[in-house]
Amino acid sequence: MHFHPHGHRGFGHRMMHGMGRHGFRGTRGGGRMFQHGDLRLLILALIAEAPRHGYEIIREIESRLGGAYAPSPGVVYPTLTMLEELGFVTAASTEGAKRQYTITAEGNAHLAANQATVDAIMARIDEAGSGPDTGPRVLRAMANLRFALKLRLGRGSVDDVAADRIAAILDAAAADIERS
């Protein structure tokens, strides 16, 4: 439920936002965006703003971070289950299997007791989300690259020649981006 700063610092290390192996490194210094327990508080705060489905929470976090990061369902949904087990939220089924989460009095009390931490999380998100406006063209291109790699790697094993070619293309693109 928290993100580690592990992982290599690839071509994105000079960018304001970077992805580590386990999640988002969203500060200018490359430190953690979310400390232990922060994502749980963030999700609870978003539910306090308005009842939400899990998917809406993922998209809201992505939006607030300017598209640079979206938590995975494998992180969000277990967190929602834990918040429900703690009595901080309730869930009601809507639209088939979708569950809409609403904060409880206990959840509001927990947020109030952790208001300074919540404020710090929101400030970090605001800072990260207000980074350079990459615009929809760059975000689209990033999604296209991710999709192309997924398709190619999904077709089966990659021999040494193909792996070298893919790596060279990505390295050249990274170097070109660094120079731009």
Image: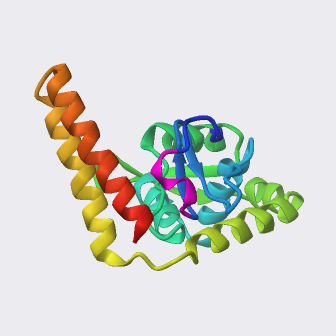
Tell me what residue is drawn at x 15 percent, y 29 percent.
162
Which span of residues is magenta-colored?
10-15
Name the quadrant containing residue 116. bottom right
Q: Which one is nearer the viewer's eye here, 25 or 168?
A: 168
Please name the colour scheme applied to the rendered image.
rainbow
Image location (x, y in percent) of residue 118? 77, 63
Q: Quadrant of the C terminus?
A: bottom left
- Residue 171 vs 123, above or below: the answer is above
- Along the horizontal axis of the image, is 42 left or right of 57? right
- Residue 155 vs 119, above or below: the answer is above
Image location (x, y in percent) of residue 128? 61, 68
Q: Main secondary structure of the magenta part?
A: helix
Name the quadrant containing residue 72. top left
**Residue 64 lies in the magenta stretch:** no
Image location (x, y in percent) of residue 21? 52, 36
Tell me what residue is drawn at x 71 percent, y 54 percent.
41
- Along the horizontal axis of the image, is 96 left or right of 100? left
- Residue 128 vs 102, above or below: the answer is below
Tell me what residue is drawn at x 67 percent, y 53 percent.
30
**Residue 11 lies in the magenta stretch:** yes
Tell me what residue is drawn at x 74 percent, y 55 percent.
107
- Along the horizontal axis of the image, is 137 left or right of 85? left
Q: Which one is nearer the viewer's eye here, 136 or 51?
A: 136
